[in-house]
Amino acid sequence: MENLLQNCIRYGLLSKPIHMFCKYSDEGICLGFSNYYLQPLSSQLSQHMFEPFFRGDQARKGEGTGLGLASVRSIVEGHGWEVRGYSKIDEETTIFEILIPLYTTRNC
């Protein structure tokens, strides 16, 4: 969560708020952040930003190795969860979210 928040701070408009959210649905629990972007995430960046050493044009202006989001994905997927990032052009926001699926277990 800290890395996703850092990305919101680094690549978002500092004059606008960052929103943290938790949503519950039949699919699961969704935790995440949304911010107003300097530039929207391209579809290519959205598809590859969680790969090790991938650095998009937006990331080149900052420091780093391109391992932060790859580490996030590794941890999240290790729990059987999902992580994604995308921009909503009509709202001028970028969203990073983690989906924790609901499991139905008995006799826990």
Image: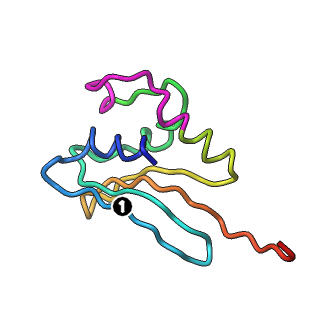
Looking at the image, which is closer to me, 62 or 89?
62
Looking at the image, which is closer to me, 51 or 77?
77
Q: How would you rate the neighbour count of disc 1 (Cα within 10 Å): few for under 14, some for 14-19, many for 20 or more?
A: some
Q: Which residues are magenta?
A: 57-71
Q: Position of residue 22 (x, y in %)?
A: 45, 68
Residue pictured at 32% horizontal, 22% vertical: 63
Left or right relative to 44: residue 37: left
Q: Is residue 24 magenta?
A: no
Left or right relative to 77: residue 71: left
Q: Position of residue 28 (x, y in %)?
A: 60, 70
Residue position marked by numbered label 1 in the rendering: 20
Q: Is residue 52 above or below residue 99?
A: above
Q: How is the image coloured?
A: rainbow
Looking at the image, which is closer to me, 75 or 87?
75
User: What is the three-letter code of the residue carrying label 1?
Assistant: Met
Which SS class for mark 1?
Answer: strand
> Which residue lies most toward the front here?
108
Residue pictured at 54% horizontal, 32% vertical: 51
Q: Is residue 3 above or below residue 108?
A: above
